[in-house]
Image (spheres, helix red, strand yellow):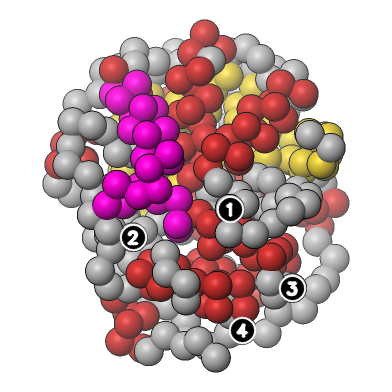
Amino acid sequence: MFKFSRRNLMKTAVVAGGAATLPLALGPQPAQAQESSWAAQKKKVRVRGLEMAYYEAGTGDPIVFLHGNPTSSYLWRNIIPYVQHLGRCIAPDLIGMGDSDPLPNSGPDAYKFSVHRDYIFEMLEAIGVTERVTLVIHDWGSGIGLSYAQRYTDRVRGIAYMEAILSPSALPPIPEPTQGAFVTFRSPAGEEAVLQNNIFVEQILIGGLGYYLSEADKAEYRRPYLQSGETRRPTLTWPRELPRGGNPADTVDLVTSYSDWFAASQLPKLFIRVNPGAIIRTGPLLDFIRGFDNQQEVTVFGSHFVQEISPDAIGRALAEWMSSGAV
């Protein structure tokens, strides 16, 4: 059975080649299926023959919350209440994640960034999200959201982002990782680590957050991935999609394209800087981001999954930005 040593776990970064490490729980935790009150609140829409789930609250102009790996719409549950009086809040589950259906022919080539992107684009169209959209984005949800804004700029009012995946052509590319769990994830050993042992959920997410999560929170994050094998494939493909060392080439091109577009965009932006954070900490990337036009910046405490650490600070900052006339 694949195991990480304690030493290697403590070196594991949230993002391959990233600068932050988190304390990770050692050993798998027991996971049992149980009824989810969060799942019961979701709506469903059919996209390409599959059911996609989303949480919705409020009315008015759409505010779309996009999660990344290995989370779900549940990530936004404590932030949405701060702004649901300001618009129609929509938090989708990416395809194969949360309560959205899995892809029918899963395998090593499934769940590419471009596939997730296209499912979300079609889902938003299907539920009438076509104008005056505010995007609230995190992790790979940032890639999907920024790609959406790049393609449909005239539909977007503003973008609030945190711990975003950016790789502009103006900066040197981030090299392939040489240590930590992401080396394993991006190698053939990743299948055992993730598909069999559920390392991304158990140790990167749950272990990294520790006491910030209740037992009910842990159960909800585990729930989509209780069965070993291909049900966990999205959580393995995502770290393999990170643009590192020029690979994978197709995703590198997409990420670079939306990153360059975002840097030049005049859309209103709220940069929620996470301190100490993981993806965006210090150095050239932070300096580059701070040069964006039409942007406000706030700082909140936390690591990569900051929504579980500082949801109130994020919610208040988002509500103030949206209410101030900036958007």
Q: Secondary structure at mark 1?
A: loop
- Please, is residue 267 above or below residue 46 in the view? above
Q: Report the residue at 77% width, 41% height from top.
A: 52
Q: Mark 3–mark 1 contact, CB under 8 Å?
A: no
The residue wearing badge 2 is 16
Q: Is residue 269 left or right of residue 179?
A: right
Q: Residues within 10 Å of mark 4 (few under 14, many from 20)?
A: some
Q: Which mark is residue 29?
A: 4
Q: Amino acid at mark 2?
A: Ala
Visible residue check, residue 322: no
Residue 82: x %, y % from top left: 58, 36
In primary-sequence order, the first of circles 4 and 1 is 4
Q: Nearer the viewer, mark 1 or mark 2?
A: 1
The quadrant of the picture occupied by the N terminus is: bottom right
Q: Residues within 10 Å of mark 2 (few under 14, many from 20)?
A: many
Q: Report the residue at 39% width, 18% height from top.
A: 268
- Please, is residue 22 above or below residue 7 in the view? above
The magenta segment is: 239-263
- Please, is residue 318 above or below residue 183 in the view? above
Q: Secondary structure at mark 3?
A: loop
Q: Main secondary structure of the magenta part?
A: helix
The residue wearing badge 1 is 109
Q: Mark 2–mark 3 contact, CB under 8 Å?
A: no
Residue 7: x %, y % from top left: 30, 87
Q: Report the residue at 37% width, 34% height from top.
A: 253
Q: Amino acid at mark 4?
A: Gln
Q: Marks 1 and 2, how far apart in space?
A: 20 Å
The residue wearing badge 3 is 227
